[in-house]
Amino acid sequence: MNIPEGLKYTRDHEWMDSKGTVGVTDYAQEALGDVVFVELPAVGRILKSGEAFGVVESVKSVSDLYSPADGVVTAVNDALVGNPELINQDPYEQGWIIRMETTGATEELLDSTAYQHQIEGE
Amino acid sequence: MDVPVIFEKSVPGRRGIRLPAADVPEVPLEEVLGRDFVRTSKLNLPEVSEMDAVRHYTRLSTLNYGLDTGFYPLGSCTMKYNPKVNEAIAALPGFADIHPLQPDSTVQGMLQVMKELEDALAEISGMDAVTLQPAAGAHGELTGILIIRAYLLAQGQHRTTVLVPDSAHGTNPATAAMAGFQVKIVPSNNRGDVDVDKLRQMVNEETAGLMLTNPNTLGLFEEDILEIADIVHKAGGLLYYDGANANAIMGKVRPGDMGFDVVHLNLHKTFSTPHGGGGPGSGPVGVKSRLEPFLPVPRIAGSPDHYQWNYDRPQSIGKVRSFYGNPGVLVRAYAYLKSHGSAGLKEVSETAVLNANYLLHLLKDIYETPFDRPVKHEFVLSLKDQKKRGAKALDVAKRLIDYGVYPPTVYFPLVVEEAMMVEPTETESKETLDMFAQAMREINGEIDAAPDVLHEAPHHTVVGRLDETLAARHPVLTYFQEGSRAQTGQEGNI
Amino acid sequence: MRYIPHTDADRQAMLEALNIDSVDALFSDIPEAARLHRPLRLFEPLSEMELQQQFFRLAAKNLSVDQAVSFLGGGFYDRFIPAAIAQLVERGEFLTAYTPYQPELSQGTLAAIFEFQTMIAGLSGMYAAQASMYDGASAVGEAAFLALAHTRRPVIVMSSTLLPDSQQVVRTYVSARHGEVLTVSSVQELEQVLASRPVAGVIWQYPDVWGHVQSLPRAVELAHQYGALAVVSSDPVALALLRPPGEFGADVVVGEGQPLGNHLNYGGPAFGYFAVTEALVRKMPGRLVGQTLDHQGRRGFVLTLQAREQHIRREKATSNICSNHSLNALQATIYMALLGPAGLREVASLSVNKAHYLARRLEEAGLSRMGSEEPFLYEFAVKVPGSVAQLNQHLLSKGILGGYDMGRWSDQWEGYWQLAVTEKRTKGEMDMLVNEVKRWMSR
C-alpha cells in the first residue's frame, strides 16, 4: 500500500498536499475497484470542510468526495473526464482530483503514519 | 461470435408488415403541418422481412434463461412458476383490448376482477383497503410513503425522517428520499434482526415511519416485530411493510396483525405473474382504515350490480401513474388467487418455507450460514471461507451457470460478506433442490481442485464474462453511436 | 395444490431430513399474538377448466374495441398489432426471465433492450434512451424529478394541454420533493412565469391534448433562455412524421409507449419511454444497457451506469425504480422491427389521412374543431352542441365507442369531444359515426 510521507490524509481516504491538491488514496482506489466516472465540482465553488463536492464511481459502487478543508476550488483535473482510470493507475499524481485554496478550518488531518494505522484497523 | 443486433440484418427497401391502402383522400403532410414540423431526418429503424425479425428474436430468446428453462433460485425475487393458463386468460380480447377511457358500463367484468382482487389482497395482508394503481414494488413503496406523509400532514405533523434497516432493499432508502424524507439506517443485531435497543434510541418526534421487510432480506422472521411496531407507534410514526417477501407468510401471519399500517405486495413475485425480463410488475398498496382517505385516485366504487370509478377524494395523494394500474397483470394475479383459494395460498407459503429450510440443510455443512436459525422462504450464505480458498461468491455463481442453473442473488444483503441469497420457491421439486445442492457441493470441491474453472466460468454461454468496466467508462448506449460496432466497421455475425 | 410438485413421500422425506414433525415448526418464531389462527376468508380453489370458464364469462362482460368501433385516444390508441409479436414475446425465455443481472444468461433481453434504446433515441431525436418506465405519466413525473435535481431549482412549469393524468402525476411527484408546480396555457404565460421565479423544468406535450404542435419550438427556446430544462412528452408514433423534439432542442423526451405494438390492457401494462441529451445520461432514472466485450473480444451487452440506481446508490439514487416494463418494451421493439421506417410512417400517415377526413366531415356537420387554424395529425377535438355524455350514450347504443368527453378531465373543457383516428378505422366506420352524430343532433 502506497502512502507517501509528505501528504496529509483524511479519515475518508483522501489526501491533500501543501498546495491544496486533493485526491483519493491508493487504499481508496483499491477498495473502489476500476473507477469508471468522476463527478467534478465547478471551479470557483466554495466548499466547507466535510462538504461533499463530487463523486467517484466504479461499476458496482459509488463514493462521495468530501472537502478536507474550508476553501474554494481553483482547479479540477479535467483529464479524469475521459480517463477516470488515472485514479487507479496513479492516485497521487496524474489522478489528482481538485486543487483548492484553503481559507480556514481543515478537518482533522492525519500524517502518513497515523493514516497507516487507521487502515490497518479497518 | 457477437451477440446479434437487428440493425445488422437491415437491407434498404426490405419490408415486413404492410398496411392497407388508404380508403380516404391522401393529405399532403407539408400542407397539413407546415414545413417546420415535418420530419426530415431518417427514421433509423431496421428494414427486414417478417421472417428475418421472427428468426432474430427467436435467436435472441435462446440466449436468455427463463424460469421455463430451469431452476431460478434468485433470492428476493420469488421466481415461482408462472402458470400458462393465466397468460391465456389475460390475452382474452375482453381483457387485453379494452381502452382505459371506455365508459364504466362497458368494463364491468374488468372492474369486478379488480374489486375482488382488492378485497382478496386486503384479507391476505390484514389491511382495510387496497389500491391497485402502483405499477411495481418500488412504485408501491413511493405510493405508501406518500400516503404516510399525507396522513401525518393532515394531523398537523411535519415529520422528516424515515427509518430503514441496514439489511433493506435499495428501493427502501431510495423511496424515502424520493418522497422527500431523510433516511436513517437502523443497524441489525447479531441474530440478523433489527436491533430493538438501537431503534428505541433512534425514534423521536421527527420519525415518520419505519420501512421493514418481514421476513427480512436475510430470510429471517423479525421475532421482535410486535415490540418494534410498538416503539414506532409510540413515537408517533407509522410502520411500512415491504411485501417483497410475502411468499413466506400467506395464511400464517398478516402484516396488518403484526402492526403494519401500510403494505405493498409484489404481484410479480408472490402472485406468480411473469417478470418479463424486468417487468411489468404490479405493486398494490394496502392500508389501515385511517389511511384510506389518502389512497390514490380513482377508487372503485359501487356494487356488483354496477361498479364505477370515484374521483371525488379530496384527501387523496393524487395519481402515481396514468389510469388504474396494470390491469393486464392484475387479471393474471387474480386468476392465480382463484386457482389457489385460502387453503392453497397457505400451502404455497408452507412449501416455500419447507423448500428453503430443506435446501439450507443440504448446504450448511459446507457453506457458512451467518445466522443459525430456521429461515422462511429464502436464506443467505456467506462465502467468506470459499473466498479465502480462492473463489468469490461471484465465481461460484458464474460456475453454477455451467451446471444449468440460474445463479442466486450475490452480494446482497449488504450486511453479509460474500453473500449468496437463495430462494427456491414452492414450485420446485425435491429432485431439483437435491440437484442444486449437489452442484454447490461439487463447485465447492472445484475451488481447491481446479480454481481456474471457476474464475473463467461460465464456459458454455454465448459470451463469457463481460467487461463491465469498459461498458461504464465509455458507454455505448445505442447502435448508431460512436464506438458501436456500426461505427467501428467491424462485422457483426450473420 | 396444482403448482406444488411434492408428493406426500417427498414432504415426509424433507421433514425427516430437518428432523421435525410438521412444517409448523418452521413458523414457531412468529409471535403467537400476531399469528393468523383462522383460514383466510377467500374462495374455494378452482381447477384450470373452471378457472377458464369463469374468466371467459368475466371477459365477456367487457366490450372490447374488437367488438365496437373505437375513437378513443388520450395516449392509448387502438392500433393494429402484428400477430408475430405475441408469438415471440410469449416465449418462456423472454416472458419468465428476471431482470438481466446475469448477463451471460440474459443476452436476449439485453440485446433487445439495446435495440429498443437505439430505436427510441432515433425516434425522439435524442442521444440516448433508457430501458423503459412504467408508463408515460410516471415518465413525465420522473422527468420533473430530473429537472429539479439537475438544476437545483424548486419550480416545475407544465402546459395545461399536457395529458391530464401526466399533470396529476407531476403534481404528486413534485409535491413529494416539496417543489412547486405551475400550469400555463400559452407561451406568453410561460414567459411571464419563467421571468418571475427560478424554474427547473418546462414540460410541454407534442402533439398536445388538442392535437396541436405549434407552440413547442418557442416553449423550448424560452425554457433554455431562463436556464430551465425543456421536457417534451410525445406519442412515439407521431414522431414518425413530426420533426422530433430533439431537433427543437429538448433536453428530455418522454412518452407513453402503448401505441408501439402494445395492447390497450385497460391502461396497462404498456410502457413509458425516457430519452435525453448526452449531458443528462447519468441523470436518467432506471436501467440502461450498454455494449461491451468479453475476454475473447465478442460483443455482448450489460446493464451499465448502475451507480445511478437504487441498488447501489440507495438514498442518493436518481430514482427508486427497479422493475420496469421490459416485456412491453420488447413488444415495441419487435413492432418497430416488423414495420420498419416505411411501415411506421404508413401507420402514422394512414391515421392522418383518415383523421383529416373525419374532421372535415364533422366540420361539415357543424362541429367546429378546437383551434381550427392549428395543424393536427390524427387526434383532435370538436365542440359538441349539447351533452357529450348523451352523444356518447347514443353512439354506444350503435356499437361505437365515441370520443372522450373532455369535460370529465376539466370543467374548462366542457363540451369538447376528443377523437382519435387510427389506421384501423375505415371510411365506412367514420361515415357511420358522422351519420349517427347528425341523427343525434337532429333528435
Image: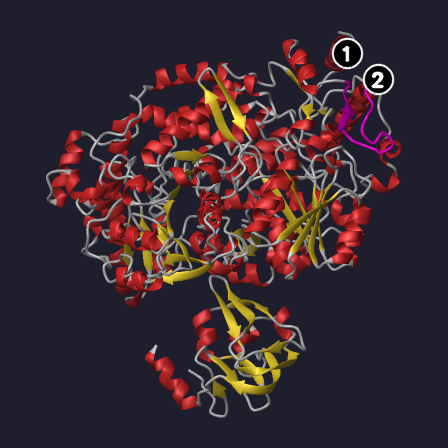
Using the image as rendered, state which of residue C363 and residue A81 is in the foreground: C363
User: What's the chain of the residue with tag 2?
Assistant: C
Q: Which residue in the structure is indicated by mark 1?
A: C441
Q: Earlier in the sequence, mark 2 or mark 1?
A: 2
**Quadrant placement of the N terminus of chain C:** top left
Q: Which mark is residue C366?
A: 2
Residue in the foreground of this view, choosing between C418 and B476:
C418
Kind of residue at disc 1: Met
Q: Which residues are magenta?
A: C366-385
Task: Judge if badges 2 and 1 mark residues of a common chain.
Answer: yes
Q: Residue at x 32, y 34 (%)?
A: B124
Residue, far front: B156
Query: Decide: marks 2, 1 in contact (CB < 8 A)?
Result: yes
For the residue carrying disc 2, how many other residues have a C-alpha within 10 Å: few (<14), some (14-19), or many (20+)? some
**Residue at x-position 61% and y-position 48%:** B492
Direction from residue B147 to residue B450 in the image, left or right:
left
User: Horizontal and vertical percent for residue B484?
Assistant: 64, 54
Looking at the picture, does residue C350 appear above or below residue B478? above
Task: Give the chain letter at badge 1.
Answer: C
Q: Give coordinates of residue B31: x percent, y percent.
A: 89, 32
Q: Is residue C384 magenta?
A: yes
Residue B4, picture quadrant: top right
Q: Could you tell me which quadrant the C terminus of chain C lies in?
A: top right
Report if residue B318 is visible in the image. Answer: yes
